[in-house]
Image (cartoon, rainbow, N blue to C red):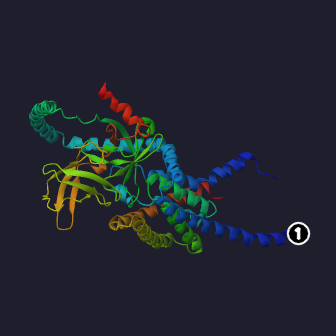
């Protein structure tokens, strides 16, 4: 009996090693296969991905809280040191902004009057959903954010995501309670934009650097550093006129745009529910349509 | 004599420490830090963990677990699915095949080993990501990530060593 057991063991030992080798190679092949499959946008993989982020987003929210608290504390101490200067600066700024507010009000009224005279269609109502940033892309290859709001909150693929200062990106994937934002700076990002003053239209192309490129401008367009870039609203997915950034450098080969969004301090962002009547399918976009009908009432 | 259920459960919990720690690191590496530009150069904590445990407790960090961790981190970071799992499996494979070189030797040797592996993986990762998106992705953040990872590795290895000595001494 004993010798037989010995033989079995001697036979089983290399078998186990072979199995392990096989598993290793099989898993490597599986990873490569997944890389290829991922290119094809297969629904199962997509839903697996969103389910995982759905499950993990509350965990990430919890982990992010102490980190946030720490940063707030540091920022507080930092602010204390420059309290008087800051106060002085804010007073001046407030005085300046009050003047601008008066100008803005009268211009808005004037604009409204002209619209009525021309019987122009007003832009559809845009409703923001505020979501917390619970994850960023921990690596050099993608520029994305993970939000803790999903389809149950009305977030849909393609919606614009804005920070207080300007456009951040758009929604690329939506789960039940989490969503992924493709940032302007990601190399897959393409945003239709327009130069605010000269009204030349172009496409803002991300390339994983902090300042995206401005491309596909008309050949006769004149661009100088300092020009403001806003969304053009072409394609009907993004509201028009949202600030994006300013042209930071112009040379023969490329035009770079410095974005208004502060990439380091994105704690909360707003997802814009936006819907052009007749352009989106109510079944695919129920959250949008339901809300944007509010202005018809 | 079969061990009691409590003992087996205890053993299972201890045995899952390498996986659990790596999973936690995968979560931590996507938590927004608020430090400028850090998101793009976050050290590859998961790869470090896989490297360390593949050397010191290969049966608790086997290929299927490494694969799952890779898939999870791809889901979390939004990277092309399969990229991290491929890279982590390669780290695991190299570490496993060379573990005799590292076990029981000075830490500096492990560090040097990590340098070689991490550098190779960073370049390969960059190459595949470029091919995947058919564009030239800036190499600077990749190298910065490599250097940061290299700097953080001793600290993490020390923590892993503590865990290993306290929780996994007899497993």
Visible in this render: residue A257?
Answer: yes
At x 62%, y 57%, the residue is B168
Question: Is B27 on the left-hand or right-hand side of B143?
Answer: right
Against B129, residue B8 (above or below) is above
Q: Which residue is mark 1?
A: A2
Q: Nearer the viewer, residue A37 or A26?
A: A37
Q: Residue furthest top?
A: A297
Say which quarter of the image contains residue A255. bottom left
Say which quarter of the image contains residue B115. bottom left
Q: Nearer the viewer, residue A144 or B162?
A: A144
Against B134, residue A70 (above or below) is above
Residue B167 location (% of width, % of height): 60, 54
Secondary-structure class at tag 1: helix
Q: Nearer the viewer, residue A166 or A221?
A: A221
Pointer 1: residues within 10 angstroms few (<14), some, or many (20+)? few
Visible in this render: residue B81?
Answer: no
Q: Chain of mark 1?
A: A
Residue B88 location (% of width, % of height): 52, 64
């Amino acid at each position: 009996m004993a010798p037989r057991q010995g033989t079995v063991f001697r036979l089983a030992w290399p078998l186990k090693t072979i199995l392990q080798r096989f598993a290793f190679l099989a898993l490597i092949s599986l990873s490569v296969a997944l890389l290829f499959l991922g290119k094809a946008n297969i629904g199962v993989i997509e839903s697996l991905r969103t389910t995982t982020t759905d499950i993990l987003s509350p965990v990430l929210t919890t982990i992010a809280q102490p980190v946030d608290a720490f940063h707030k504390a540091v920022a507080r101490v930092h602010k204390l040191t420059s309290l008087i200067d800051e106060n002085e600066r804010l007073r001046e700024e407030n005085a300046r902004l009050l003047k601008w507010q008066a100008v803005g009000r009268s211009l808005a009224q004037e604009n409204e009057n002209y619209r009525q005279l021309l019987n122009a269609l007003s832009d559809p109502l845009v409703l923001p959903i505020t979501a917390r940033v619970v994850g960023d892309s921990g690596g050099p290859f993608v520029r994305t954010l993970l939000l803790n709001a999903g389809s149950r909150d009305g977030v849909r693929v393609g919606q614009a995501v804005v920070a207080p200062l300007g456009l951040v990106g758009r929604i690329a994937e939506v789960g039940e309670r989490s969503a992924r934002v493709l940032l302007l700076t990601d190399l897959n990002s393409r945003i239709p934009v327009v130069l605010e003053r000269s009204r030349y239209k172009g496409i803002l192309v991300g390339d994983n650097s902090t300042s995206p490129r401005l491309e596909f401008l008309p050949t006769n367009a004149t661009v100088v550093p300092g020009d403001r870039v806003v969304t053009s609203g072409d394609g009907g997915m993004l509201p028009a006129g949202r600030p994006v950034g300013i042209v930071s450098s112009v040379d023969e080969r490329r035009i770079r745009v410095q974005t208004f969004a502060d990439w380091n301090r994105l704690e909360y962002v707003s997802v814009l529910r936006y819907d052009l009547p007749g352009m989106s399918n109510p079944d695919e976009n129920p959250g949008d349509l339901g809300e944007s009908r509010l202005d018809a009432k | 004599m079969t061990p009691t259920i409590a003992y087996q459960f205890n053993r299972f919990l201890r045995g899952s420490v390498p996986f659990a720690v790596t999973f936690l690191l995968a979560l931590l590496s996507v938590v927004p830090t608020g430090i400028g530009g850090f998101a793009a150069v976050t050290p590859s904590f998961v790869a470090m963990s896989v490297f360390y445990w593949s050397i010191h407790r290969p049966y608790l960090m086997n290929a299927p677990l490494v694969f799952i961790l890779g898939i999870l981190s791809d889901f979390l970071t939004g990277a092309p699915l399969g990229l991290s799992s491929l890279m982590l499996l390669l780290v695991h494979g190299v570490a496993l095949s060379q573990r005799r070189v590292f076990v029981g030797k000075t830490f500096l040797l492990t560090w040097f080993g990590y340098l070689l592996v991490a550098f190779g993986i960073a370049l390969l990762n960059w190459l595949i990501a470029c091919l995947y998106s058919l564009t030239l992705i800036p190499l600077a953040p990749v190298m910065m990530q490599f250097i940061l990872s290299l700097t953080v590795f001793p600290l993490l290895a020390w923590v892993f060593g503590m865990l290993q000595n306290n929780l996994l001494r007899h497993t």
